[in-house]
């Protein structure tokens, strides 16, 4: 995985660009469809990442608020 991850991060965008270039060379309409598809998938992925980050921030804020309220109030323990 040490070698595979960087290789995928480099070769995937290069392959997409070369594929779109080849699509323009063969048939212009095909390239526009490919670009539209790549943009839609990128937008969906970006929205997914934004939603995950927003929910994670809300959970962290709720946890920080809960910790702060626990520190201010003395603990009440019931004896058996």
Image (spheres, rainbow, N blue to C red):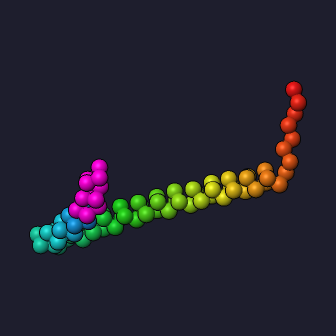
Q: Nearer the viewer, residue 57 or 22?
A: 57
Quick check: 48 left or right of 68? left
Identify the main secondary structure in magenta. helix
Q: How many numbered discs sit on the rendered protein?
A: 0
Q: Is residue 27 visible?
A: no
Q: Nearer the viewer, residue 29 or 8?
A: 8
Q: Quadrant of the C terminus?
A: top right
Place residue 9 in its image quadrant: bottom left
Question: Where does residue 61 sit, x and y in percent of width and height?
Answer: 66, 58
Q: Nearer the viewer, residue 72 or 45?
A: 72
Question: Where does residue 20 sit, x and y in percent of width and height?
Answer: 20, 69
Q: Residue furthest right?
A: 79
Q: Residue at x 30, y 68 (%)?
A: 36
Place residue 11 in its image quadrant: bottom left
Q: Residue furthest left?
A: 26
Is 60 inside the magenta-drawn segment?
Answer: no
Q: Residue at x 27, y 69 (%)?
A: 35
- In magenta, the rendered stretch is 1-11
Quick check: 42 left or right of 25? right
Q: Nearer the viewer, residue 19 or 74?
A: 74
Question: Where does residue 31 sit, x and y in percent of width and height?
Answer: 21, 69
Quick check: 34 left or right of 62? left
Q: Residue at x 12, y 73 (%)?
A: 25
Quick check: 65 left or right of 33? right
Q: Residue furthest top?
A: 80
Q: Is residue 70 visible?
A: yes
Q: Residue at x 84, y 44 (%)?
A: 75
């Amino acid at each position: 995985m040490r070698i595979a991850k960087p290789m995928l991060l480099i070769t995937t965008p290069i392959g997409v660009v070369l594929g779109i270039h080849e699509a323009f060379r063969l048939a212009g309409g095909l390239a526009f469809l490919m670009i539209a598809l790549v943009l839609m998938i990128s937008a969906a992925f970006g929205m997914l990442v934004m939603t995950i980050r927003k929910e994670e921030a809300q959970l962290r804020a709720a946890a920080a608020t809960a910790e702060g309220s626990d520190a201010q109030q003395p603990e009440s323990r019931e004896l058996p």
